[in-house]
Image (cartoon, rainbow, N blue to C red):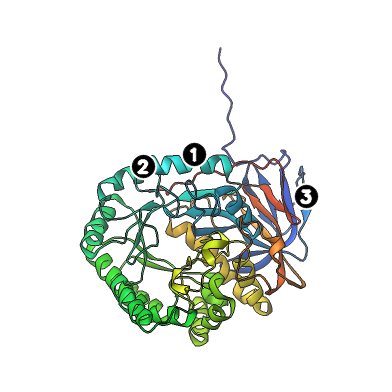
């Protein structure tokens, strides 16, 4: 006679079973507020959240005085592998992310070579990341003229979304999209349930203004800034919003650098366009004077804006007009960041390790007010927008045990020696920080602890949107 037994659901632990980990006495950060509680972890999941947990545990961490922050989901990185691993690489990039409190990244289809334009390319990058990443990850597919018939394959292979450039990307194998192809591609993406992200700068206007600066014999940082004013960004945002409204496509506007751009997006949302806005730490931390002062290490596109606009972005963030923040980590070897011609310098900021930490530092005097805002845009909103919300993004029972510990600390100066990126270049070197990320946990496993990567960490898992 056979006998059946009732099995516990995965992630559920009986009261008599010891937990794998208990965090005691930390201040848990949620989008709703900050409150003191213990966290219990078993089988990679949060299984208890209570004022006090008395269960037995294999490991206990004293989190008194620390803020337990949900694992940062960075939806915008360029780790450049395969093909340009000498620029960064999945191992070094994910290590730097973990050092900064990140537990998951979404890698862009460029600047890897070949770019991810079809299912085979996505599967190849996935295989590399599953071997090398110490954090969980998702992968973007590319959206360029000529690959629209690859969208279904990219979706089925698990692409988190599609990325298009409305200006030159700087990579010859990833050309900018024209308006006709953008419209047709958005129609197809909408039918497939694929979100489309756009780099919103008008390529024709940027080229015209760049030519005007060069005709004057100007090639310095100020000339570059003059060649890409806010109008270049706004024109492209308008085009993308109009087509998203026409086609019903879900749109994500990446690295919005201006309050005017956010206003256009807010207006479109009020008209029921399915659109979300991302900005980056560098637009909240730096301004156009830093481009002149720091040089190529602070070059990006769209460029850094003036100080009033930087301050206005903080106001918009606190008002809920920014849905996500991503690092747009885009490193390059030192030789590509050195030139007397600022237009020829590779544009990209390396900030995946310290950008988020410096956001925490920037609001250190108002943590109880601002940390919940950051928990929303760095974790919960990202998981929801990209359909990972059933198990990522919040410190709640049943969700993955992804979190980091933030501790207030005496001010230190960030040095190049502490960078885990392949090339120790960052505009944040030399800045002061009063925050330490002491631990980062991915699915209950510590991948970063006390200033170093832990040995024998579990490999990162590939994440697919739950369409």
- Mark 1–mark 3 Cα distance, whole angstroms, equals 34 Å
Specify the quadrant that holds the N terminus.
top right
SS of the residue at dot 3? strand
Q: Earlier in the sequence, mark 2 or mark 1?
A: 2
Q: Please, is residue 111 above or below residue 198 in the view? A: above
* Relative image position of residue 356 (x, y in whole percent): 60, 67
* Relative image position of residue 381 (x, y in whole percent): 48, 63
Q: Provide the residue designation for mark 3.
A: 60
- 443 relative to 315 in the view: left or right: right
Q: Nearer the viewer, residue 87 or 2?
A: 87
Q: Please, is residue 190 above or below residue 318 in the view? A: above
Q: Do we see residue 267 in this rendering?
A: no
- Mark 3–mark 2 Cα distance, whole angstroms, equals 43 Å
Label 2: few (<14), some (14–19) or many (≥20) C-alpha neighbours in 10 Å: many
Q: Which mark is residue 119?
A: 2
* Relative image position of residue 8 (x, y in whole percent): 59, 35
Q: Nearer the viewer, residue 368 or 358?
A: 358
Q: Provide the residue designation for mark 1.
A: 127
Q: Residue at x 54, y 76 (%)?
A: 284
Quarter residue 413 falls in: bottom right
Quarter residue 15 falls in: top right
Instruction: Tell whether label 3 touches label 1 (CB within 8 Å).
Output: no
- Please state which of the two labelled residues, at mark 3 or mark 2, is closer to the viewer: 2
- Mark 2–mark 1 Cα distance, whole angstroms, equals 12 Å
SS of the residue at dot 1? helix
């Amino acid at each position: 006679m056979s006998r059946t037994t009732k099995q516990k659901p995965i992630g559920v632990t009986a009261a008599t079973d010891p937990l794998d980990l208990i965090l005691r006495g930390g201040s848990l950060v949620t989008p709703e507020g900050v409150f003191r509680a213990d966290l219990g972890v078993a089988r990679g999941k949060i299984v208890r959240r209570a004022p006090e947990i008395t269960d037995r545990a294999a490991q206990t961490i004293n989190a008194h005085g620390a803020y337990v922050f949900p694992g940062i989901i960075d939806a915008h990185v360029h780790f450049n592998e395969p093909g340009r691993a000498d620029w960064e690489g999945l191992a070094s990039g994910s290590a730097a992310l973990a050092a900064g409190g990140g537990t998951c990244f979404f890698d862009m289809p460029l600047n890897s070579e070949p770019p991810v334009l079809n299912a085979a390319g996505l599967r190849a990058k996935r295989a590399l990341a599953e071997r090398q990443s110490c954090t969980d990850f998702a992968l973007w597919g590319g959206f360029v003229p000529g690959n629209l018939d690859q969208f279904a394959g990219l979706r089925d292979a698990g692409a988190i979304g599609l990325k298009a450039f409305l200006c030159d990307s700087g990579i010859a194998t990833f050309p900018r999209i024209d308006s006709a192809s953008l419209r047709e591609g958005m129609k197809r993406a909408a039918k497939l349930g694929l979100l489309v992200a756009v780099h919103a700068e008008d390529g024709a206007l940027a080229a015209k203004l760049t030519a005007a600066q060069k005709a004057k014999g100007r090639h310095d940082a100020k000339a570059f800034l003059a060649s890409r004013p806010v109008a270049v960004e706004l024109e492209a945002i308008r085009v993308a919003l109009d087509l998203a409204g026409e086609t019903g496509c879900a749109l994500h506007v990446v690295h919005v650098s201006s309050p005017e751009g956010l206003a256009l997006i807010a207006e479109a949302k009020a008209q029921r366009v399915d659109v979300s806005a991302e900005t980056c730490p560098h637009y909240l931390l730096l301004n156009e004077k830093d481009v002149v002062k720091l040089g190529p290490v602070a070059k990006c596109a769209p460029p850094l804006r003036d100080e009033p606009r930087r301050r206005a972005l903080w106001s918009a963030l606190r008002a809920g007009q920014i849905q996500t923040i991503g690092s747009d980590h885009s490193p390059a070897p030192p030789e590509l960041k050195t030139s007397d011609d600022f237009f020829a310098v590779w544009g990209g900021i390396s900030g995946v390790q310290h950008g988020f930490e410096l956001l925490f530092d920037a609001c250190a005097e108002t943590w109880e007010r601002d940390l919940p805002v950051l928990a929303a845009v760095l974790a919960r909103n990202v998981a929801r927008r990209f359909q990972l919300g059933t198990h990522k993004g919040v410190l709640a029972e049943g969700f993955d045990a992804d979190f980091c510990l933030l501790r207030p600390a005496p001010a230190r100066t960030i040095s190049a020696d502490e960078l885990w990126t392949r090339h120790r270049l960052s505009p944040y070197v030399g800045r002061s920080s009063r925050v330490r990320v002491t631990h980062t946990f991915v699915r209950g496993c510590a991948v970063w602890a006390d200033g170093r990567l832990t040995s024998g960490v579990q490999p990162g898992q590939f994440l697919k949107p739950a369409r």
